[in-house]
Amino acid sequence: MSLDQIELSRRVFLKQAATVTGGLAVAFYLPPGMTATDPKAPAPAAEFEPNAWVRILPDGTVKLVVHKHDSGTGTQTALAACVAEELDVNPMTVQVITPENPFFDTYIHPVWKVFSTGGSTSVSLEYDRLRMAGATARALLMTAAAKQWKVSPDSCTTEEGRVVHVASKRHLAYGELVSVAAHLPAPAKVTLKDPAQFKYIGKLRHKRDAAAKVCGRFKYSIDVVLPQMLVAVIQRAPVIGATVLSVDSNAALQVPGVRKVIRVPGRPDVLGGNVEGVAVLADNYWAAHQGRDQLQVQWSESALSGFDSDQLAGAQAAAIEDKQAQRVTAMAAGDVGAQWATAAKVLEADYRMPYKVQNPLEPICITAQVKDNAITYWGGVQVPSSALEAAQAVCKISQDHVTINELVSGGSFGAREAKYWLFEVAYLAQQAKVPVKLMNSREDEMRALFMHPATLHRAKGALDAQGRLSALQLQAVSPASPEQWEPGYFERPDKMDYSTTEAITAWDFAYRPANLDLVWVKHESNVPSGWYRSVSFIPNVFAVESFMDEMAHAAGQDPLAFRLAHMQDRPRHVAVLKSAAERAGWGQPLPPGTALGIATHQGYTSFIAVVAQVSKKDGVTTVDKLTCVVDCGLAVSPGGVEEQLYGGLMWGLGHALFDRLDIKQGRVVQSNFHDYRVTRMSDMPAVDILVVDGEPGKPGGVGELGSPSVAPAIANALFNLTGVRQRSTPLTLG
C-alpha cells in the first residue's frame, strides 16, 4: 500500500450529507478494480446516494456500517477495524450496523455482480476503500476543528474519537464537530496511516460480541419475535423432484397452537428455487413440528426415484470416456499425450469424494412480513440479491420496498447461499398476512437440497529417468457449481466454471511440469448441488496433493522435496511449505508407529501448508497433530484469522474421516448427527498454527483456506504409516 497522499475526486470518492439528526455521514467509493494506488481510474457513471460507511452523531455516537454478512466468522470485527483504524476510534467500542439499503450500488460484489458475501473475499476486497473511508472522515473532522480554532488542519491530529491541537492542548470530541464537518467540501487529498502506526489492524485478538455469545445474550434469527408472528415448518418432498398429489391436514389442524396449513408451490422456473412442500404454521415451533407429524401427504413419483449415489462413480467414470461430454481445459502446457510412451514410469489413480451437507450449528431460520406491498426480512441473509429475487418473483415487490434487518448467523458453510428458504418464507408471509418465522430442524437441514456434490478425479502422471514429473493430467468430474445461480455461463468464451476448477487454474495451481493438462469434465446427475465452504478446493486439492505424494514415492523421493522441485516462482508458497515441515519435524526421527503426511495449496490469494501426524498404538490409529502455516498477506484481525484456521482444520478433519451423505432411490439416507458423523471436540488432535504476513499491505482470504489440505495430508500420513494408499473419503483409520 502506497502511503503517498492520494488525490480524491468528490464524484468518485466522497458523498457526504447531514443526517436527520444533524450528524456527519461519510461514504467512500471505489469503482470496481480500482485500488487506493490508482487515483486516475475512471469515475463511475453516477454519484452514489448518501448512504454511509461512517456515521458520527452529535451525542458522540460513532457507527460503522458493515455491508457484509457475518456468519460468526468475525467479518464485522475485521471490516470495522479497517475504518476505525484510520478514523482513530476503538473498533470494539463503536456501534457496527448493517446498511438500511442493502442494495446500494457500492455494496455490490465487484466480481460476482450481485449483493453477496462469500468466497473469502470480504476483507481482501474492502480493505483499501474502508481505510480510505475512515481517513476521509478523519480529515473532515480535523478541518472542522481547525476552523473553530482558526488554525491549520495540519497542526491537528486525532486520538480516541477526538481532534487534538497539540500546541494549545485543545481538543474536541467528534460529536462536537459534526454540525460543521457535515457541510464541508470534500478534502482534496488524504493520507493513510503508515502501518507502523496501526493500533488495531494486525493487532486484534478478540471478536466483537464474544462475551454476549458466550453468555447467551446475543440475538440470532431464532430469537426474532414479532406481534402476531406465526412459526412455520415445511414438509418437503421425500424424493428429489416429487410433487404434492394431495394433503389431508385435518389431524394437523387439531394440534393445539396450529393455525394454518399452506401448500407451498415449487419454483422450478427459478434456478435454485424451492421444491414443493406443505407448511404448518403455529404459535410456536413445537406446535408446528407436532402438526407436521400429523400431516397426511401423498407425493408423486420422481425422475430421480431410482438415483443411487453408490452408482454415481461409475457414471462419472463413463463421462471421462464419453467423447460427447462437455470438457473444459482449466490449464494446459506442452503435450501430455506424447509423454506416456517415452516415460520412465507412468502412474494412474482415481480419487473420490462423496456428497456432503453443510450442517451449520444454527439451522436455517428466517422471518418475513409482507405488508402494504412491501416485504421485510429478519435474519442472517448472506445473499441479499436472493432475498430481492424472492420478493420480486414470489410477491411482485420492487427493490425499493424490500427491507432486510440483517443478523449475524450461527454459521453458514454455504447453506445460507441457497435460495429455497427465502422463496418459501416470502410465499408464506404473503399468504398468511402476518409475520412468519420459517425454521428448519436438523433433520430438515440434513435432507434439504443443494448439498456438496460427489466427485471423481482421474490423475495420470509421467516420470522421466531423473525422477522428475514430466507430465501431469487431471480430469475432474463434477456438476457445474453455479449453473443454478449463473445461467448461461457455459456460453461464455472460456466456458469456465470457476467455482468448479478452484486450485487447478493458472493463478492457484502450485506445480509447473513441462507438460500439463488439467480438465474439468462436466457431468450432471440432476441431483441439485449448492455452495459449500471451500467448494471445489476440497476435492481438487485432495486429488492433486494425494497424487503428488504418490508420484514422489514412485520416484523414490521425499514428498516435500518433490513438491518444491516442481514449484517455480512461488517464494511465498515455498516458504509456508518449508516452515510447516520444519515445525512438524519433517525429516527428523519419529517415535515408533508414527508417520507424517504433507499437503499444500493456494487459495483466495493466500497460501497454506498442513502436516498431519498419525500414529498406531495397541491396534488403534489416531490423528495426533495438525501443523498449519499460513501466509495470508496481512492478517487484519490475527485472532480471528487463527480462529478461522482452527475451524477450517476441524472442518477438513470431518472431510477426511467422517463426512458422507448417501442417496438411495432418490432419498437422502442420513437424518441427523447420529447417522451423519461430524467432527467432535474429542476428535480434534493437537493443533499448531502459524500465521505470517507475507504481503503486509494486502490481506488475503482465510475463511475457506484451512480445510482442503487436511484430508490429503492425513491420507498421505496414513500411507507412510501403513503402506496402504486410500483414494476416497471418508478415510479409514483402522
Image: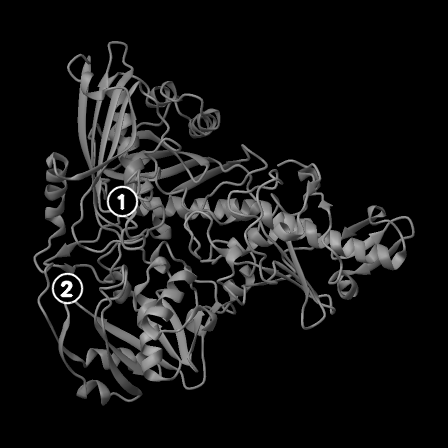
The answer to whether any part of residue 190 appears in the image is yes
Query: For this view, does 68 lie left or right of residue 268?
Result: right
Mark closer to the observer (2, 1): 1
The percent coordinates of residue 299 (x first, y second) are: 12, 72
The correct choice, above or below, for 150 with respect to 432 in the image is: above
Q: Residues within 10 Å of mark 2 (few under 14, many from 20)?
A: many
Query: Which mark is drawn over residue 564?
Result: none
Query: For this view, does 354 lie left or right of residue 399?
Result: left
Residue positioned most to the top: 465
Q: Amino acid at mark 1?
A: Glu
Query: Which mark is drawn over residue 491?
Result: 1
Quadrant where the N terminus sits is: top right
Q: Residue 730 sits in which quadrant? A: top left
The correct choice, above or below, for 684 with respect to 590 in the image is: below
The percent coordinates of residue 455 (x first, y second) are: 21, 43
Query: For this view, does 548 lie left or right of residue 694?
Result: left
Residue assigned mark 2: 239
Quadrant where the C terminus sits is: top left
Q: Earlier in the sequence, mark 2 or mark 1?
A: 2
The structure's colour scheme is one colour
Q: Provide the secondary structure element on which disc 1 rests.
A: helix
